[in-house]
Image (cartoon, grey):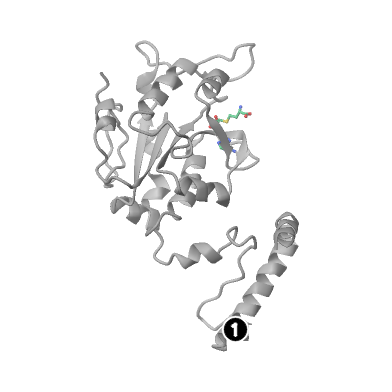
Amino acid sequence: MWRGMTDKPRSHGRLKARPTLTPRSLMEAPERPGSWVARIITLFPGAFPGVLGESLTGRALDEGKWRLEPIDLRPFGEGRHRNVDDTPAGGGAGMVLRADVVARALDVAAQGVPPDRARWPVVYLSPRGRRFDQATARRWAGAEGITMLCGRFEGVDERVLEDYGIEEVSLGDFVLTGGEIAAQAMIDATVRLLPGVLGNAASTEEESHSTGLLEHPQYTRPATWRGREIPPVLLSGNHGEIEKWRRAEAERLTRDRRPDLWTRFRDED
Ligand code: SAH
């Protein structure tokens, strides 16, 4: 039986931000049925909640609107030293996370969650994956929760990805040291779409990557700063004109900065 999965359980002052997770606790009925859950398999459970503990996502975590369940990979390791990795078959630099070790963690993460991947995606953060985007965040926010596997070193033995039918998802076309930052970025993008997390739901409908256009520029006080004025139309009180201006600016920015998005937007419009 696993007991504490880290030597020093750390409290983040959050409702469910526990770096330790025992099979027993996973079998218990959720404290807040219905709240979205992120189960994160990681060698660095202390990296969570990280920035997710701040601001809107942190408050929502405190309020139980979503839950974070880091699962420390280390206790699933082999032998006295709980080894989780070994050298790559065929040679080469670095280390690879072992399939058997990762599988044991995945089995614990699967306890009490629906096997239907539409209801509960199981993903590996990976630079080889499909690129994460707003549509993926929306899909995940519509699920009951997600299991994320954070890699380290050279990555994970391919066989465990195949055997568990794991979806690979990338934060972008660059290589990170580990999956934890990618996991936090994707959880942030997903959690802010959950009902009641952002105070103003309309703000997720009009922002960049929701409408197909990048967002228009934003301004606030002071009205003049270093000789720069706020565009007068925004101070006119004429909402029709303001909408027209914002729309034109959104189109201009999208055309200039992201011809790929602009083409798609025009084709769909
Ligand atoms: N050798 C691998 C990279 C390993 S990087 C390759 O060339 O594809 C170590 C870990 O960091 C990966 O296992 C993955 O979990 C994470 N990672 C690195 N870049 C990432 C990215 N762009 N998106 C998501 N996860 C990433």
Element under label 1?
Answer: helix
Q: What residue type is labelled 1?
A: Gly
| Residue 153 picture location, percent across and down | 54, 25
Q: Where is residue 129, by image quadrant?
A: top right
Residue located 45% across and 49% down the image: 141
Residue designated by label 1: 240
Q: Where is residue 112, by image quadrant?
A: top left
| Residue 13 picture location, percent across and down | 26, 47
Q: In this view, does 211 lie above or below 13?
A: below
Q: Is residue 262 above or below residue 33?
A: below
Give the camera-side residue of 76 and 239: 239
Q: Is residue 106 above or below residue 133?
A: above
Using residue 106 as the reference point, say whether residue 151 is left or right of it.
right
Q: Is residue 230 visible?
A: no
Using residue 98 as the reference point, say whether residue 197 is left or right of it.
left
Give the camera-side residue of 57 and 251: 251
| Residue 171 picture location, percent across and down | 58, 42
Q: Is residue 240 visible?
A: yes
